[in-house]
Image (cartoon, grey):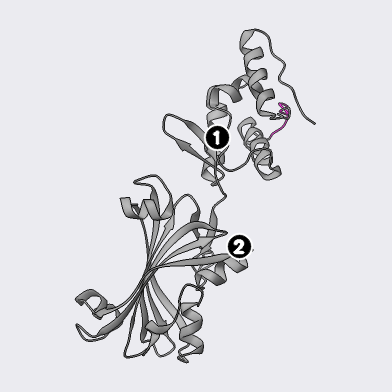
Amino acid sequence: MALTPVQNGRDTAKSTQRHETRKLHFEPLDKNSFTPMYFQIQSHLLKMIQSGELHPGDSVPSEEELARVYGVSRMTSRQALQSLKSQGYAAGQKGRGTFVTQPKVEKDIAHLAGFSAEMRSLGMRASSRVLEASCAAADAETAARLQIALNAPIFKLVRLRYADEVPVAIEEGCLSRDRFPQIESIDFRSASLYQTVRERYGVAIDSADEILEARAANRKESELLEIPARSCLLMISRILRSADGKPIESARSLYRGDRYRAVLKVFASVAE
C-alpha cells in the first residue's frame, strides 16, 4: 500500500512535492507494532532499493525529509539511515547527503577460494586487468615469506579485479620462478592463477595464513578502484601453502570497503 504523506502546513506541501517529483512511495508505519519505528523506516527504504525504486547512486531522503514524511523525530530517522548504511546499502557523502550503494559482497574468510570462483558463486562475472606481470629478484621480506634465497627469481603479478565490470579489488602476488618455471608466459588477463598452479604445475593448494587489516586508499589505489581519496580498504595479506606446508604465493589483496565485508563463522570450543 502506497502512502502519500498527509500533514498540515507549508512544510508538508514542499515535502510531498519533492517526493512526488522523485516518484517515491512511502508505506505507513504501524505505530502499534512492537517493531521499532526506525526499523520499519529502514525496512521501507530497503524495499525501495530492492524493488528498483531507488537505484545505486540515487540520493536517499534526508533525516529531515523522513522525519516529516513519517511523523517521527530526527533521532528516529537518523537511526533508520544509520541502519541502512551499516548493512552496506547506503553511504554518506560529506556535504551532499546519503546515497544508495551496491550491497556489499560478503567474503567468507574461513573458506579459501580464488576471486573468479568467489564471483561465480555470487552469480557475478569476474574479469581482470593486468597491471604488472614481471620477473624480479626477491627482496628480504618476499624471500622470507616464500622461504627462498634472497635475490632468488620471482614472478610478480598485479591485477585489478572486476565484478560485473566494476573495479572491486587490487591483487598482488609473488611466486618462486624456480618452483613455477615459465609462469610469466601465461596470459593472466583470463587465466586463473590458482587453477594454473593446480593444473599446469600439479601443486595442490592446502591452506593459507592470512592477516586482515583496514587502511585508507592512497591516490593511485583510489583512481584504480574509482573511489574517493582516503576511502577505507580491507587489506588481506596472505601466504598460500601447499599440502607439504611449503609456501606457494606471497600475496596482498586490497578490497573496496564500500563493496566488501569479511564474515567468519566461529564455533564454541567448549559448551557450558
Residue 240 percent coordinates (x, y): 40, 78
Left or right position of 126 against 226: right
Residue 15 position within the rendered picture, expressed as x and y whole percent measured from the top left: 63, 18
Number of marks in the rendered image: 2
- Point out residue 236 in the picture as x, y percentages from the top left corner: 39, 64
In front: mark 1 or mark 2?
2
Instruction: Give the residue type that dot 2 points to.
Output: Met
In the rendered structure, the answer to whether residue 136 lies left or right of residue 103 reads left
Does 102 sit above or below residue 60?
Answer: below
Residue 57 in the image: above or below residue 235: above
* On screen, residue 159 above or below 84: below
Residue at (46, 30) in percent of width and height: 96
Identity of the residue drawn at 38% across and 47% down: 231
Q: Residue at x 39, y 49 (%)?
A: 232
Q: Does the segment drawn in magenta span residue 76?
A: no
The residue tagged with tag 2: helix, strand or loop?
Answer: loop
Furthest-top residue in this view: 9
Left/right placement of residue 185 relative to residue 111 reads left
Please name the residue that numbered disc 1 is placed on.
81
Residue in the image at 72% along x and 29% along y: 25
Q: Where is mark 2, residue-wise?
A: 124
Label 1 sits on a secondary structure element that is helix
Residue 119: image tag: none
Q: Quadrant of residue 171?
A: bottom left
Q: Could you say which is closer to the camera, residue 43 or residue 10?
A: 10
Q: Is residue 121 visible?
A: yes
Residue 128: x and y, percent?
48, 67
Is 30 inside the magenta-drawn segment? yes
Residue range in magenta is 29-34
In the rendered structure, which amino acid carries the disc numbered 1? Leu
Tell me the quarter of the picture where residue 239 sits. bottom left
